[in-house]
């Protein structure tokens, strides 16, 4: 709101808010499980590809921290449900308020770096399932899809991002 007073960190009512460790874990453990399941799926095609996939996932998280987090008002605070607000400043400097670049725009422009972590294993899993039609592969792909396309979004919607006061700036939560 235009007339709402912001605290020193730039986020209304957030400077004192600390996300509890259980919520940070709830937000990150399913993502790590997704990366692991994705590596297993990708590795079924060719095992060295699984290692490459995990390296990409790690690099994508670092790129996320460097390209998106510095523009977030939670940068440098414990108000980030992912915990990235505390981790990203160890590697990158804040760009909150950088002229012409707001969090929403930067997020939309750069979130694609994370897409291969979901789409590559999905595509490889579907291709392998078409070739093999094994129950084991079907279960693995099904669990991957449940974690990546159901559990992670639901955790964000119902827990992690639910009480976030900047969700109107977030393309994920502030859909208009």
Image (tube, rainbow, N blue to C red):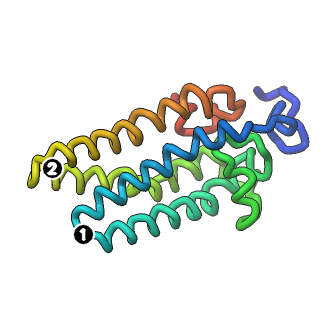
Taking the view exactly as shown, the residue that stands out farthest to the bottom is 48
Which residue is at 56% across, 25% downward?
Answer: 158
Q: Could you classify mark 2 by the number of other residues whose Cα lies within 10 Å: few (under 14), some (14-19), or many (20 or more)?
A: some
Against 38, residue 169 (above or below) is above
Relative horizontal placement of residue 37, taking residue 3 as reference (left or right): left
Determine whether label 1 and label 2 are within 8 Å by CB. no
Taking the view exactly as shown, the residue that stands out farthest to the right is 8
> Which residue position is annotated with label 1?
46
Q: Which mark is residue 38?
A: none
Which residue is at 74% across, 45% downward?
Answer: 74
Q: Which mark is residue 129?
A: 2
Q: Quadrant of the N terminus?
A: top right
**Label 2's element?**
helix
Relative horizontal placement of residue 155, taking residue 15 as reference (left or right): left
Which residue is at 56% across, 63% downward?
Answer: 63
Earlier sequence position, callout 1 versus callout 2: 1
What x and y, as percent, mark residue 115?
A: 41, 53
What x and y, as percent, mark residue 64?
A: 57, 58
Q: Could you classify mark 1 by the number of other residues whose Cα lies within 10 Å: few (under 14), some (14-19), or many (20 or more)?
A: few
Measure the alpha-carbon separation of dots 1 and 2: 15 Å
What x and y, as percent, mark residue 29?
A: 54, 46
Asked whether 48 or 17 is in front, the reply is 48
Which residue is at 84% across, 27% downward?
Answer: 4
Asked whether 104 or 34 is in front, the reply is 34
Against 106, residue 51 (above or below) is below
The picture quadrant where one finds residue 127 is bottom left
Number of numbered discs visible in the structure rendering: 2
**Label 1's element?**
loop
What x and y, as percent, mark residue 147?
A: 41, 39
């Amino acid at each position: 709101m235009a007339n709402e007073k912001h605290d020193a960190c730039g986020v209304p009512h957030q400077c004192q808010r600390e996300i509890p460790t259980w919520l940070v874990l709830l937000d990150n453990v399913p993502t790590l499980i997704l990366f692991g399941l994705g590596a297993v799926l990708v590795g079924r095609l060719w095992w060295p590809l699984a290692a490459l996939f995990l390296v990409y996932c790690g690099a994508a998280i670092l790129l996320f921290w460097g390209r998106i987090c510095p523009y977030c008002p939670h940068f440098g605070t414990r108000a980030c449900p992912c915990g990235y607000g505390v981790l990203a400043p160890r590697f990158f400097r804040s760009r909150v308020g950088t002229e012409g670049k707001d969090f929403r725009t930067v997020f939309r422009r750069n979130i694609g770096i994370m897409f291969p972590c979901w789409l590559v294993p999905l595509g490889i899993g579907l291709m392998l399932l078409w070739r093999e039609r094994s129950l084991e592969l079907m279960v693995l792909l099904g669990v991957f899809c449940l974690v990546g396309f159901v559990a992670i979004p639901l955790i964000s919607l119902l827990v992690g991002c639910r009480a976030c006061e900047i969700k109107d700036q977030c393309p994920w939560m502030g859909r208009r």
